[in-house]
Amino acid sequence: MENERLDLLLDAALEAAAAGSAVLLHHLSHQNDRLVIRAKRDGSPVSAVDLESHTAIQNVLAPHGIPIISEEGDLPPYAERSNWPLFWLVDPLDGTQSYLDHREGFAINIALCNASGPILGVVTDPLSDRIFAGTQSRTPFTVSLTNLSEHRPITPRPATRPYRLVTSWNEALSKEDLLPASLDAGAFLMEAVSGALKFCLLATGEADVHARSASYMEWDCAAGDGILRSMGIAVRDRETNQPLTYNSMSLRVGNLYASRL
């Protein structure tokens, strides 16, 4: 893809992330709002805010004519979407339970993918007023929700001991099992972090390794994967050691591993 068009789509993704964040922050500041909450088939919660954020994001992205796969949208049949050369992968509220509990750690994830994977990734942390972004032609940067044009390049911190391994709150494995044998597990501290913000910590150098043993959905990791790819860090399947692939029939990815060491 030409850099000029990719930059145009990056601007759209940033605008969409800001639009979704406005929805989340509005409802967060109106704590007396009665949010309609129901459980999905997998038992995870979905609220009216998820759906409203989805609509706000879709309204910005749809005019660009690229199909959208969203956690809260209608999913086209695999026979239709399997040949898409380009598509958006969106989670309009990553960490719904954290959001409903008024805890930090929720995010908005927007990725643009082609057959090789994410070529653009945007992860938004509304509470810290930061959007993390990167593309195949731009190294990672952050912007404020209120000033999308002022890109601040990310300069990762140097890696120093003890190293930091970030994983999910429900991770069942120990750090010894999550890390490859080539790394000394004793040199690592292991910490649970919510959602896609784990990828952002790796990008800034606030974490050194991100690993998890359980599978989850493509829209949970594509945006973070896109950011890390923009700085040369591969997000791999722990079993095959191959880069993650997207737009599968199930839209699930296996366990993953990413390291800057």
Image: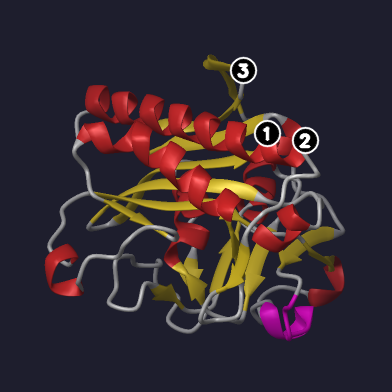
Residue topped by disc 1: 26
Q: Residue 138: give x, y in percent of width and height.
A: 42, 30
Res. 156 visible in picture: no
CA–CA distance between discs 2 and 3?
A: 17 Å
Tag 3–tag 1 contact (CB < 8 Å): no
Distance of mark 3 from mark 1, alpha carbons?
14 Å
| Amino acid at the residue labelled 1 | His
Q: Amino acid at mark 2?
A: Ser
Q: Residue at x 40, y 47 (%)?
A: 111
In the image, what residue occupies the spot 59% across and 36% down?
Answer: 23
Q: Which part of the image, by quadrant, shows the C terminus? A: bottom right
Q: Is residue 14 left or right of residue 69?
A: right
**Quadrant of residue 81 in the image?**
bottom left
Residue underneath mark 3: 146
Are circles 1 and 2 on residues that touch, CB within 8 Å? Answer: yes
Q: Earlier in the sequence, mark 3 or mark 1?
A: 1
How far across and down, in percent of the image, does residue 212 sit? 63, 74
Residue carrying label 2 = 29
